[in-house]
Each structure stands twice: as structure tokens, then as C-alpha cells.
Image (tube, rainbow, N blue to C red):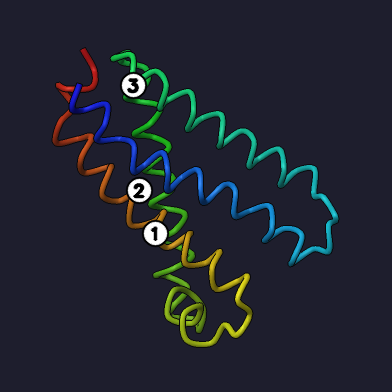
Amino acid sequence: MKNKASLIPLLLIVACNYVAQIPYSFHQYNGHVNPVGSLLILVTLLWFLLGYILIQKHKRMGYWLLLSFLVVQCIFYFFNEVFLSFYGYGILYHFFHSKDIVLWIVFFIGDLNFIAACYYVYYLIKRKSLFSK
């Protein structure tokens, strides 16, 4: 079905973003594991996967789980990439001042995730009837 395939780019981008957190964590924190941070990442990953799987099965709950996940992603990245730009951080700082290739790649993947989340919020709302029968 066409609408199932249309979510594959979202799955790939979000998966890359979660995988990127592994080298980022080792690089930034020298392999020290933050239990609370790890739990939050695991919970959000499960939130995404549950929504993604259920929406593929045309379950109404999947639509709302995935949409809520994406809205939270948009808010998170908007704050970190756009709002913090006014304070000398954010997307422009990452692209033009980060000389660390690991950080640059992880931030770039995060920025792609931000764009994808915003697009798919629009996409899901516009095509709600296709996904929540």
C-alpha cells in the first residue's frame, strides 16, 4: 500500500538518529553511561517504534502515537536548533563552528531528523484518513 511505503524515509532517518547517539555518547562522555539519559532514549525509541508499527497496521492508536512523537521531536529540535540560535548555539553554530567531525555528523543527522519530523507532522495531519481507519 502506498501510504505504508511513504513512511519508510521517516523510519530510516529516525533510526539513523538513534544509532548516531551511540558514537556521540562514547565521543562526548568517554563511554560513561548515563542511566537516566539511556532510559529516556529507550522510552522515546519504543514510543516511535510502537507508533510506527501500529500505524502500519492502520490502528488509530498508532497514528496518535506517531504524531505525538513527531510533535515532541519538532518542539525539542525547534528549541535546540532555532531558539538557542539567538543565544549563540543551534543549527548555524553547529554547521559553522564545529570542527569535530563526529559532532558535525551527529548534529547533521539531528537536523535531518528535525526537518523530517516537521514534514511528517504535516503529512500525517493532511492524510489522517489514510492512516487511522
Q: Tell me the SS state at disc 1.
A: helix
How far apart, in angstroms, are the residues tagged by discs 3 and 2?
16 Å
Q: Tell me where residue 129 sits by quadrant.
A: top left
* Closer to the camera in the image, 79 or 5: 5
In the picture, the quarter occupied by the C terminus is top left
Q: Which residue is mark 1?
A: 112
How far apart, in angstroms, are the residues tagged by discs 2 and 1?
8 Å
Which residue is pictured at 15% across the width and 31% down the height?
Answer: 127
Which residue is pictured at 20% across the width and 35% down the height?
Answer: 125
- Residue 89 picture location, percent across and down: 51, 78
Q: Amino acid at mark 2?
A: Ala
* 114 to the left or right of 30: left
Q: Residues within 10 Å of mark 3 (few under 14, many from 20)?
A: many
Contact check, label 3 and label 2, Cβ < 8 Å: no
Q: Residues within 10 Å of mark 1 (few under 14, many from 20)?
A: some
Using the image, tell me which numbered label, if any, was put on residue 117. Answer: 2
Q: Residues within 10 Å of mark 2 (few under 14, many from 20)?
A: many
First in sequence, mark 2 or 1: give its number: 1
* 8 to the left or right of 34: left
Q: Which residue is mark 3?
A: 55
Q: Tell me where residue 20 sits by quadrant.
A: bottom right
Q: Tell me where residue 4 sits by quadrant.
A: top left
